[in-house]
Image (cartoon, helix red, strand yellow):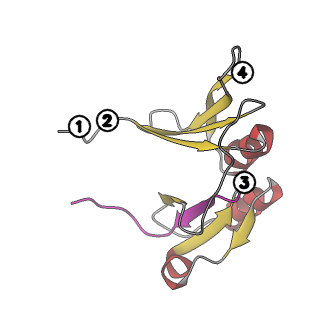
Amino acid sequence: MIDPTAPIRIARPSRDLAAAERFYAGGLGLHVLYRGSATAPGEHDLVMLGLPGAAWHLELVGGANLTAEPTPTDEDLLVIYVGGPIDEELIARLEESGGRRVGQGDYWDRWGVTIADPDGYRLVLSTRTWSNG
């Protein structure tokens, strides 16, 4: 059985790690937890972003050795349950940091704001809360 407090890593390829970092760190406010450069064939440049104390982080890989191009679909969502109104300043920061506000269908448009990151992956900031109970 999986421990419900087990850490989660979400890994994605990125065409431009610097642009992705501007979006997730400068725009969203995540912290750079680790940054690495490829030092051998088959390795990737990477940046890990998250929040101190969180049991999850986002790992973005890129660089010259990237073998998988980002291929986001409209359903590749990273949803963050904010539990209240979405700050318009946050949305503006995300757009200034390379994001693009997009529609996500009736459900998510009703319950939040969706921003496409520089690679086209979608971040949903939901006004709802999450309960697994």
Q: Which residue is mark 2?
A: 6
Q: Which residue is mark 3?
A: 119
Q: Which residue is mark 4?
A: 37
Q: Magenta span has 58?
A: no
Quarter of the figure with residue 11: top right
SS at mark 2 in the image: loop
Q: Which residues are magenta?
A: 119-133
CA gap between label 4 and label 1 equals 32 Å
**Do tag 1 and tag 3 residues touch (Cβ < 8 Å)?**
no
SS at mark 1 in the image: loop
Expressed as whole percent of the image width and height from the top left, the position of residue 129 reads: 39, 64
Residue type at the position of mark 4: Ser
Q: Nearer the viewer, mark 4 or mark 1?
A: 4
Question: Residue at left 56%, top 63%?
Answer: 125
Question: Residue 74 vs residue 80: left or right?
Answer: right
**Do tag 2 and tag 1 residues touch (Cβ < 8 Å)?**
yes
Q: Which numbered dot is residue 3? A: 1
Residue type at the position of mark 2: Ala
